[in-house]
Image (cartoon, helix red, strand yellow):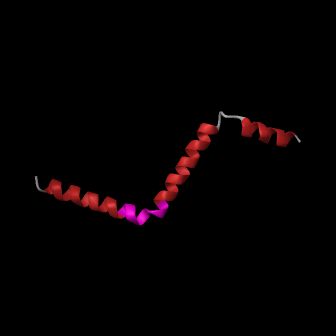
Amino acid sequence: MQGLKNWKDLWKEEDGMGTIEVVLITVVLVSLVVIFKDQLTGIVEKLFEKITSKTNRF
């Protein structure tokens, strides 16, 4: 029963909530990057092409 009490205490404890929030946000962001990888790669490539073409003019 001691283990169950520790889990209840852990659940009620709020010190680790900030860490859990950061981990959940990180998981969501990584998931979005994985899902939209092709679209993000295309956007970044177009952006670098524009930057390169504009810097070559000077």
Identify the residue shown where x is 24% and y is 61%.
49
Question: Relative to 36, is 25 above or below?
Answer: above
Identify the residue shown where x is 58% and y is 48%.
24
Place of residue 6 in the rendered image (x, y in percent of width and height, measured from the top left): 80, 38
- Main secondary structure along the magenta-highlighted residues: helix
Place of residue 37 in the rendered image (x, y in percent of width and height, measured from the top left): 43, 63
Place of residue 17 in the rendered image (x, y in percent of width and height, measured from the top left): 63, 38
Q: Which residues are magenta?
A: 34-41
Count every numbered label the image shows and give the total: 0
Q: Residue furthest front?
A: 12
Q: Residue furthest right?
A: 1
Q: In the image, 38: left or right of 32?
A: left
- Write down the quadrant of residue 8 in the picture: top right
Identify the residue shown where x is 59% and y is 37%.
18
Q: In the image, 22: left or right of 6?
A: left
Place of residue 35 in the rendered image (x, y in percent of width and height, measured from the top left): 48, 63
Q: In the image, 13: left or right of 27?
A: right
- Write down the quadrant of residue 41 in the picture: bottom left
Foreground residue among 48 and 39: 39
Q: In the image, 50: left or right of 23?
A: left
